[in-house]
Image (cartoon, coloured by chain):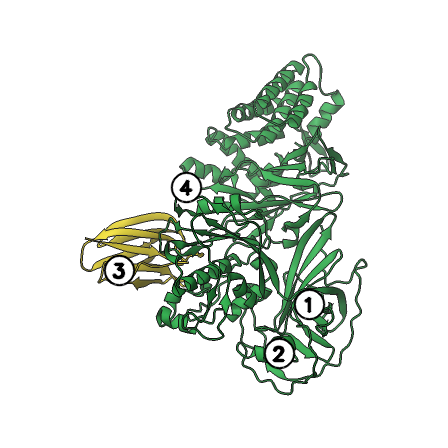
Amino acid sequence: MSTTDPTLVTGDRSLTQEREYDAEEVAALADAAVSTEEEPQQTTQRRTRGRLIEGDAADGGPAALAPAFPLPFPSIPITPFRLLHRTSGRYRGTGSVQLELRVDVDGRRPLRRTSGDFYVQSGATLSYFGSFVVHSPAITVTSTHVIVDGIGTFTWSAAYPRVRVSVPRTSIFHAPGSATVQFLTAGGAAGASYACGHASPFFRTIQLEEDKVSGLTPFVSYDTSALAAPPPARSLSIAAAYAEAGIEIQVAGIRNVVPTGAIGASWSNAELHNAMVSNFSLWQNIPQWKVWLLTAQLHDLGPGLLGIMFDQQGAQRQGCAVFHASLAGTTPSKQRDQLYTCVHELGHCFNLYHSFHKQYMNPPQPNRLDSLSWMNYPWYFPGGPSSFWSQFPFQFDDPELVHLRHAFRNDIIVGGNPFGTGAALEDPRAFEEAIEDNSGLRLELRGRTSYLLGEPVVPELKLERTDLRGKETVPHLHPNFGFVEIGIRHPSGRVMVYRPMMQHCVDPGRTTLNDEQPAIYESAFIGFGDDGLYFDAPGLYQLRAVYLAPDGSRVVSNIFSVRVRSPVTRDDDSVAELLLGTEQGALFYLMGSDSEYLRNGNDAIETVLDAHGKHPLAVYARLLTGVNATREFKRITPDNKVVARAPDMDTAIVNLSAVVDASIQGKGVDNISLNFAMRTLADAQEVSEGPDAAAETAKRMLEHFRKQKLNAGVLRAIEAQVATYQPGENHLEIAERKAFINHLDPSNR
Amino acid sequence: MRSLRVDLQAGFDGDRVSLSIDGREVYARDDVRTDYSIGLADTVEAVVPAGEVRITLELPDRGLRESLVLPDPGSSVGFSIEPDGRITHRISPDTPRYL
């Protein structure tokens, strides 16, 4: 996967010649006191000298700045009769590293910023890399160019943090010019450069699909002069309100009409979410610029709830609803309430909090109770709702506008970071959903979703083809081999990438997923690794994996939630205490060891077996003890002699048989681990008791898995395993027996 | 007798919450959590005697307790927990609205 800093110069990127411009300094402005909220990465406000841009004829030029930024405008050079394209808007590059750039220096409520998102093409996948924003650039205007130059804040540690954007000023009778983006060190050494063609006058574009419950009339537009309000009077639809913020809303999809009879008039959040998944034709459980709005009658919370952004599971913030039990009507007041509620709920979808809840965001910001914003409650405004409406200019406040236009992509994109949270996985580049995925593969994390505290967490990985022509893949899904990484979000919000205790270097080999073998599977113990214990507290954990395919594609899995339950009984508590230790974690990772350095861990495992042998989690202690007993363990004595502890097959058979018995009754380990345990048991029996006993265990394994509704390919693989165990025939040659004993590799089970 | 509505609003973060009216516990729940899309964690409807009533909100695991006398039981009250741990309340003569 590409983790290369895109501000660096690399050989495969087309360099664009950066010009030097003799900028005419027009005026120095003190940076407006616009704090950046809902953008948690922005923690400092720098005040720098900015430069006033030249007038924009198409938009009324600097006069349009006045309402938001009442600043002096001295010495503006006039370019007579030049009707110029507005510089502000969105630009997009092409190639293996693609930059989507936003320049915000003129037009309506200019914020004097530039920002961008990088996307990386890898094989057949396009993935988000990271974002940056320049909050206080110097803006220079010449007769030919607008140049924006400043130090950026990045989602990664950029080697070239200074950003210089140059946009030619072109006549409206010609196509808008392309922006050139040059990354530099603070000292001015040049890094990478990108050419980005003009894409849109809007900073972002989102598709809105509106559905409604039958019999209801969705909101269309409101004339702001219908009731007392500040000028200018205009007709506002939802799209028009967002257009004023620089956000393009494209109405998309076909308006579905949800029949009233199916659900009744009143909706719960769960029903709304289900309706979204069923009716939102653009819905996917991934971040995307697509959002759903339902006009419904009533929420279960009653008529006091006018609207809600209900989608707070999975990829959040994709849907909202407004309720006509209180909003319906054609009076100006009702129409105004409908407009306000629709824009407000969609604001939540863009990860905006209420004006009076900013302090609860992550990270917090000061509340703004007196904000004249779409995101306030008019009835919480000082002076009450009449005071609010008489002053409300039908717009977002300035910090919200900064968020809408320039927030890092995952802080705003619908389906991005959880509502109110700016946190991301530790390495966002590794776990971003592909924007386009033509890899022909699908990776799934699955398995048990609930574990008792202390229980080894062992998710299953399934890689299957989506390309019916067949797909060649690397057959190793265990994170030990480096082709799969797993990210873990701790209940505290802390995010880690699972790092195996040992990285296995292997010839990756190839296997083909086809009709015969449509998928490959692996289970992986990820409870312990290089960072210690990963599931050391009760709560909800979220896992996501990414697989690196041979063609370079990054195949990202679903987000898989695992709940670690609190101990209920005193026995639960004691066993959790005994199993949750770094030495015990290492022992589970290694499937046992006689190492002196892990003596305390082995003592704890023995205590589980001796004092809590009937506890459900004792099965894991037995598995570990049984597998370890099949192997000899060599150690080097202080006088440099190699001493080996011989395999103890009796101990192995007793413990593994108990694991098998419990698991077949559904009280033990997962299927893949059971398969491993039964084959290990059969091998141990063959060595100790002869091939008939091994064949009996193999036969039992086949009978068990035939009842499990496994797919045909998996069952065929098990049948092939079982076929090697035949009564009267040794499965393992003598040399192989020794190899089995010495080289049982837990990561290959 | 009249009905009283108590809204648990901002700042609840998986808390154990107890609500008493005139010394009688009318609400006790674990894992109370604010949904910031509307600013509401839970709603309690209680039938109370006419006249003033004393409402006590307690978050025992955080050691927080707030008691207030509501002169008009026909109104509603919303409690919030500020980030610094203070319990604040907002009394409204009407049924509160959310969006």
Q: Secondary structure at mark 2?
A: helix
**Mark 1 neighbour class, 10 Å CA radius: few under 14, some 14 to 19, many 20 or more:** many
Q: Is residue B73 above or below residue A749?
A: below
Residue at 70% over, 75% down: A147
Q: Kindly give the residue lying farthest to the top in the view shown.
A: A728
Kind of residue at badge 3 = Ser
Quadrant position of the C terminus of chain A in the picture: top right
Q: Is residue A74 above or below residue A374?
A: below
Residue at 64% over, 70% down: A88
Judging by the rendered image, the residue that carries numbered circle 1 is A161
Judging by the rendered image, the residue that carries numbered circle 2 is A61
Give the mark nearer the N terminus: 1 vs 2: 2
Residue A5 in sight: no
Which chain wears yellow?
Answer: B
Q: Secondary structure at mark 3?
A: loop
**Mark 2 neighbour class, 10 Å CA radius: few under 14, some 14 to 19, many 20 or more:** some
Give the mark nearer the N terminus: 4 vs 1: 1
Kind of residue at badge 1 = Pro
Q: Colour of chain A?
A: green
- Point out residue A614 in the picture as x, y percentages from the top left corner: 46, 28
Judging by the rendered image, the residue that carries numbered circle 4 is A261
Judging by the rendered image, the residue that carries numbered circle 3 is B75
Q: Secondary structure at mark 1?
A: loop
- Asked whether A313 or B93 is in front, the reply is B93
